[in-house]
Image (cartoon, grey):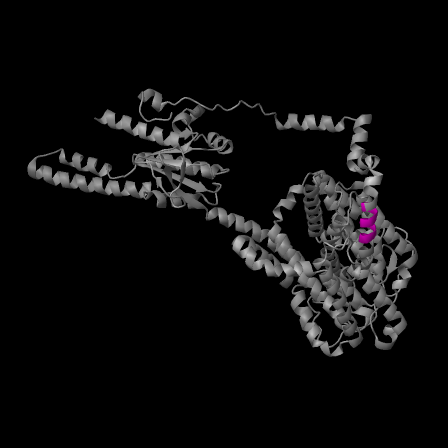
Amino acid sequence: MEEAAGDPETTLDPPRLLERRARQRQSTASTLKSKMKRGMNCSAPRVRSTLAGFFPVVRWLPKYRLREYVWGDVMSGLIVGIILVPQAIAYCLLAGVEPIYGLYTSFYANIIYFLMGTSKHVSVGIFSLMSLMVGQVVYREVFLAGFDLSDDSKASGAGVLNDSMGLNLTLGNVHSVELMGMQCGKECYAISTATALTLMAGIYQIMMAVFRLGFVSVYLSDSMLDGFATGASFTILTVQAKYLLGLKIPRHQGYGTVVVTWINIFANIHTTNFCDLITSAICIFILVAGKEIQERYKDRLKIPLPTELVVVAGATLASHFGNLNTNYGSSISGHIPTGFIPPSVPSVELMSRVALDAIPLAVISFAFTVSLSEMFAKKHGYTVRPNQEMLAIGCCNIIPSFFHCFTTSAALAKTMVKDSTGCQTQVSSLISALVVLLILLFFAPFFYALQKCVLACIIIVSLRGALRKVRDVPARWRASRNDAIVWLVSMSATALISVELGLLVGIVFSMMCIIVKTQNAKFSLMGRANNSDLYEDVDEYKNLTPPPRVQVFRFHSPLYYANKDTFLKCLYKTVGVEPFLEMTKRRKAEKKAKEMSLQQANANCDKKNGEVVIGLVQRELEFHAIVLDCSAIPFMDSAGTAAFTGLVKEYKEIGVNVLLASCNTSVIDTLRKGQFFGKNDKDMSSLLFHTVHTAVLYANSLQSSKESEAD
């Protein structure tokens, strides 16, 4: 129907240009039955397919192009392995465990992801954020077990704030606690806590994969994750600052770690170890200079500069031959044994204590791994399976937890190094694991004299990328104020309260922003463009003409219980008529008119004047129809249906027709279930239209018919 003129009957009952398909949906019971039947079907091809799905390496490794891939994989594997060794040792400071366990973690994670991962470029292993979150739990449990948190088991200096847990510890030596029937010292208890936490995180990830709960990661927006990572970087910088100065103060337990730690640092600044301070200054200068040279000449340098390895080697030699530990009291890494420790089962008692702490670890680890996998898969033109990635990272946590390892995740920096050095497949991870294995078997004891301040320098310089994002806040604000506020709130909560609560605050706040946005949605009065079928916002576009005596209204948001009142207020404000108030005015006018007519009738014996006055009152509105453009309403609930039903009824009482246009099938189905179109959808053809223009033509033809009948 393109023109208003024509046969009235044809105009008022337009032909159905589109007809919905009849879909026969299976019942839930039959759907579950068919899925169980397929799942229980066991055959040799299905077993092979399932095993190949769990271990993708059996699919791609036989197709490995040796001459084409081997050079890039070997080079990237060697370079990442060289970078990985000093970082694995350094990040153990964050995790609160001995350096040997960082090497174990890097070795096993690379092997398992080589077997189970679907990404060709992701580097899985120790990640600073994961190490920090593990360390928070480890230090808390070690503190609650009665161990001294200060380094080298020395009493902390004056003015240290560490009473947030409400415990009063004496300075007496507590050598061990009983764990799984054995006496366990401080370091034993720390790694036992870390392995229990890691096992629980892996179990959660496997459960998420089994129950297809990967959608949880969609609630972690990019702005929230960036803010969370930056806030965590400030926390990492803070907890490592004491090593730069050589201060012997324990890590703060509880909320406000950043603030309290800096208070402790300044309270004990007079005890600074100048040997550590000078070493830290030299190492930071070399590391930053190496990073700057790498960034400035990255196009000319074919491989990344092994700055960390050079610093570690040089600092170890200087500490060893200068005897810095004995002469100046500098803290060193200590003995790192060679070989492997026999596997053991994580403590069930500790698993129950850290069960809640493992949830954010599992979610963040999975989210970073999947996002990195998908990012590099799109870059290189292949696909990854998010559910398999969840299984892989879950196994990278479950299996190594029996071998004295802590939580792992994909690491952005090492993944970018792999990509830039010609990585082709996960064979590069196998090469990196072999580099770590070489250190474990032969060279680990040579790091005995390595100063802890050097490891802290490596950690702090690695945070440059995350800390630099603070400079992006103005640009982020100009692009989207909502995203900028989410970033600031997530960063502030993570840095000033705690890492775990910062994650929770960031998720809740970002979701609240979406809810608030739907409650303050944009609304538009629509106009027609140059006698065409196109209708757009009259405030946004020029040369638009509102259709005569028809108001076209568009609401830019889902319509549900939380914003239905906002929708109604916006509609009343836009069209300028609220039906309830209009009816109240008309009743008052009618009552007044009747009183006046009675007075005049008594005076003039005229009984018809009142009817004339009432008729004039009913013709005051400037429009006779409202067309609701639903093209910007993606979905609605029963409250939205009730709002539409009320609108049709209330406006009909004052002589205004309400018509719907451009509804998607989801909205139509919701309206049908709520019987908006009447029994058996008998009123659908007179209330629902595929385009705004068709609805406007129908409204005008309907009004013309009424006026012709009145004449």
Q: Is residue 241 above or below residue 373?
A: below
Residue 1 visible = yes
**428 vs 628: above or below:** below
Which residues fall within the magenta stretch?
Answer: 72-80
Residue 449 is situated, as x and y percent measured from the top left of the image, at: 87, 67
Please identify the dominant SS of the magenta region.
helix
Specify the quadrant of the image occupied by residue 685.
Answer: top left
Residue found at the far left of this picture: 604
Please indicate whether residue 686 sits to the left or right of residue 217 in the image: left
Question: Residue at horizontal 63%, vertical 63%?
Answer: 496
Q: Left or right of 421: which side holds 344? A: right
The answer to whether residue 679 is left or right of residue 381 is left
Residue 191 percent across, percent down from the top left? 82, 57
Quarter of image, res 376: top right
Residue 76 covered by magenta stretch: yes
Question: Observer-nearest residue: 49 or 342?
Answer: 49
- Give the quarter of the figure containing the C terminus: top left
Q: Residue at x 88, y 75 (%)?
A: 326
Can residue 108 be seen here?
no
Q: Is residue 42 above or below residue 586?
A: above
